[in-house]
Amino acid sequence: QLQLQESGPGLVKPSETLSLTCTVSGGSISSSSYYWGWIRQPPGKGLEWIGSIYYSGNTYYNPSLKSRVTISVDTSKNQFSLRLSSVTAAETAVYYCASLKGGWADYWGQGTLVTVSS
Amino acid sequence: IVLTQSPGTLSLSPGERATLSCRASQTVSSSYLAWYQQKPGQAPRLIIYDASSRATGIPDRISGSGSGTDFTLTISRLEPEDFAVYYCQQYGSSPWTFGQGTNVEIK
């Protein structure tokens, strides 16, 4: 069974870049069966898909964020990462990483709260 | 594709039947629709994919149905562990989108 764990700073200043890493255990990130994705949830609100990546490096981003998002994969460390530039306070949220099989997220990390504040 | 879930809140008692709706602004291709359950302080949990396929470990009192623009999640007899927020998600068209959620609360 896959396990995913997010890591990264819990506080980011406005206009700076948010960087998170997801470490995958219990399986290989190079598996052809999965995409790997990031989803966020502002406090008390709903879910928003940020983007996803295949082990080969092919990426798919939410067009609303595309100009500011980079998702990358490090197969040697069994990790994938999120970078979101020029963040604002409205992007304070719990950020989840997940494994995506066919488009649905079957395994999720526990989530990490990132607060955007000076 | 915008997904609209109704009702926003469903107040029911254990043992009752819950019917949750997810309506799409456009046809969801190939019934590429999933449902998730989320409890406070926890990550969402996949319960249904491809509109009607149960995820691993999901009991058969929970079922999904629908196609096109109208989808339904049904819980035939609510158990205490079923009280939670439920989200639908479509993955037939980019960007993948979620509904705003239905809160199933104890009456």
Image (cartoon, coloured by chain):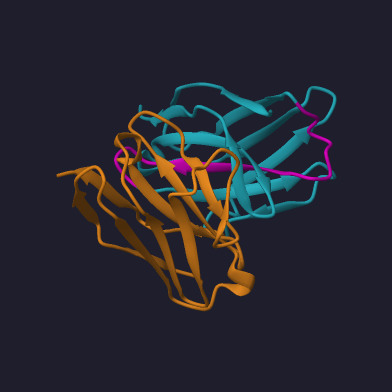
Chain colours: A cyan, B orange
Residue A36 in sight from this viewpoint: yes
Residue B33 drawn at (x, y percent):
54, 62
Residue at 56% x, 22% y: name it.
A8
Quadrant of residue A73 in the image?
top right
Quadrant of residue A106 in the image?
top right
Q: Is residue A7 above or below residue B25?
A: above
Q: Is residue A74 above or below residue B106?
A: above
Residue at 26% x, 46% y: name it.
B15
Query: Which residue is at the front of the view, A50 or B69?
Result: B69
Residue A86 in sight from this viewpoint: no
Residue A16 drawn at (x, y percent):
50, 34
Residue B69 drawn at (x, y percent):
47, 76
Quarter that holds the N terminus of chain A:
top right
| Label tally | 0
Start and end of the magenta stretch? A27-45
A84 displayed left or right of B76: right
**Most distant residue in the left direction:** B107
Query: Which residue is at the front of the view, A41 or A82?
Result: A41
| Residue A38 is inside the magenta segment | yes
Q: Is residue B11 above or below residue B6?
A: above
| Residue B17 is inside the magenta segment | no
Residue B59 drawn at (x, y percent):
49, 43
Is most of the magenta stretch helix, strand or loop?
loop
Q: Is residue B26 above or below residue A31?
A: below
Residue at 42% x, 43% y: name it.
B37
Residue at 35% x, 56% y: name it.
B100
A43 displayed left or right of A34: left
Quarter that holds the C terminus of chain A:
top left
